[in-house]
Image (cartoon, grey):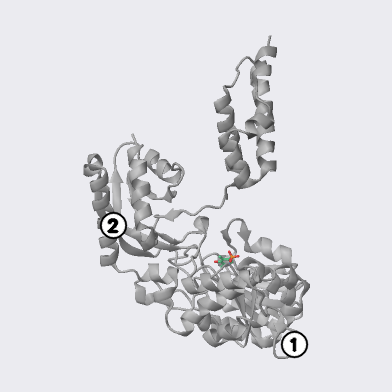
Amino acid sequence: MFQAELRKLPSVNKLLQTEELTRLTHQHGREIVVDAARTELDLARQQIMAGHPTPAPLLTEAITKRVAALTQPTLRPVINATGVIIHTNLGRALLSRRAQAAMVQAASAYSNLEYNLEAGSRGSRYVHAADLLCRLTGAEAALVVNNNASAVVLTLMALAQGRQVLISRSQLVEIGGGFRIPDIMAQSGAKLVEVGTTNRTYVRDYEQALDPAELGLILTVHHSNYQITGFTAQPSLAELADLAHRHQSLFMEDLGSGTLLDTAPFGLAHEPTIQESIAAGVDIVTASGDKLLGGPQAGLILGRADLIARLKKHPLTRAIRVDKTTLAALQATLFAYLENKATEEIPVWRMIAAESKTLARRARNWLNALRRECGSAEAALEIIDTISTVGGGSLPGQTLPTKALAISGPAIDDLAERLRRPEAAVLPVVARIEAERLVLDPRTVLPEQDQALVEATVHALARWG
Ligand SMILES: *Cc1c(COP(=O)(O)O)cnc(C)c1O
């Protein structure tokens, strides 16, 4: 009884001759379209057997959708209206124009990545950003690897494998995404020795736990994403450096965010800088390239030249090596610091430095545009005083005052979802919900995205409620 319906199904060739699928074949190649057509025809046969025949136009539509799902990038641009500047889930730091251009250039032409043009012989990729990093931080030498987590593993493995690593109990932390200091130690083969207590650790705690014959290094990990307040104590960097050096050992700091610029002039607490750690006598400092530094994903290792030389020779270095486009972007980012243009050029710093009156003006422009485009939602829109945060495991608890557009109404989660999951051709917007209102913070929306944000909001409001 299904035979008649089954016979009605078009052949793959017949389907490919339709206008829609001919276009798709030109665009994406025959193989993908044929594949999708076969799959959809199989499904259609099963549907017929189950007593639910599919009309032919729906078949073409299903094939088109299948091809689209396969050929569209899953990594898509998003408007970050959350007010969290270094948003880990939305890609952390954005690159400056100079860094973007450098990345494109490194990707599109051959380069002297590992070639010494003067000598006509093999060179090292590690020379490229090293001098600049040293100049900006005061370090003797520098090595750039894939990310900070791998920088920590490499350093512990190369300098402390099988030996004691002393760390305060206040720093045995999870950085995020399952990156836990005790696990990293275990991976690196270093012997973790916990000293002190969660809230108070003294130099004498390190001294008592230390075995001079066994000591690999003393490690301190910056409190990137949490605060210990109240009755607390932790020795200074200089005190710990002194202790390590008295025992012919090393002092390492995992700084995490790794800023070169002081955050205090922007109304934030002071985030320790790389320069300060080097000046305090830390032998090896590790930091991220894509947190407050505002560059590409990278792990920066800075410190004593003899130690950096040992790290370069370690086999793991090859496994976590940095890519040419990253080196190009990092160097271009560092030029902005060299020329004192970080707050003009680097998106993270531009966002931190954004002035309240500029933010208020942009939020007001959004509001006016929305009132023009959808008058019915008028009563639900207002400009509010609220806060932005730096995010990305830096400056926990610190906030920047901001002006944002707030939208209120019933089923606010529904509006948030409509913004996140728009119809095609509109950019997804990630917003924040605060006291039953949807909040759009201009601080993290790029000025060139203002138009797109309004458009996306108009679309979401039209489909809301
Ligand atoms: C962020 C962070 C890391 C991990 O850095 P990635 O660049 O994400 O690998 C390690 N340690 C600290 C203290 C951090 O803040």
Q: Quadrant of ligand 1?
A: bottom right
Whether residue 164 is situated above or below residue 19 in the rendered picture: below
Q: Which of these two is toward me, 436 or 203? A: 436
Q: What's the residue at 50%, 73% (across, down)?
A: 293
SS for dot 2: helix
Rendered residue at 38%/61% (across/down): 448
367 and 140: which is toward the camera: 367
Quadrant for residue 137, please give it.
Answer: bottom right
Q: Mark 1 points at which residue?
A: 120
In the rendered view, tell whether residue 244 sits above or below residue 77.
below
Disc 2 target residue: 363
State the CA–CA distance, disc 1 to disc 2: 56 Å
80 vs 192, left or right, is left
Mark 2 nearby-residue class (10 Å; few <14, some 14–19, many ≥20): many
> Residue 85, located in which quarter of the rendered image?
bottom left
Left or right? Give the position of 361 relative to 301. left
Observer-nearest residue: 218 or 408? 408
Q: Which of 10 and 250 is in front in this view?
A: 10
Asked if disc 1 and disc 2 are in contact, CB closer than 8 Å, the reply is no
Q: Quadrant of the C terminus?
A: top left
Circle 1 Cα neighbour tier, 10 Å, few/some/many (<14 / 14–19 / ≥20):
few
Q: State which tag comes first along the sequence, 1 or 2.
A: 1
Tag 1: amino acid = Gly
Q: Which mark is residue 242?
A: none
State the residue lying farthest toward the bottom.
118
Dot 1: element: loop
Residue 177: x and y in percent read 59, 56
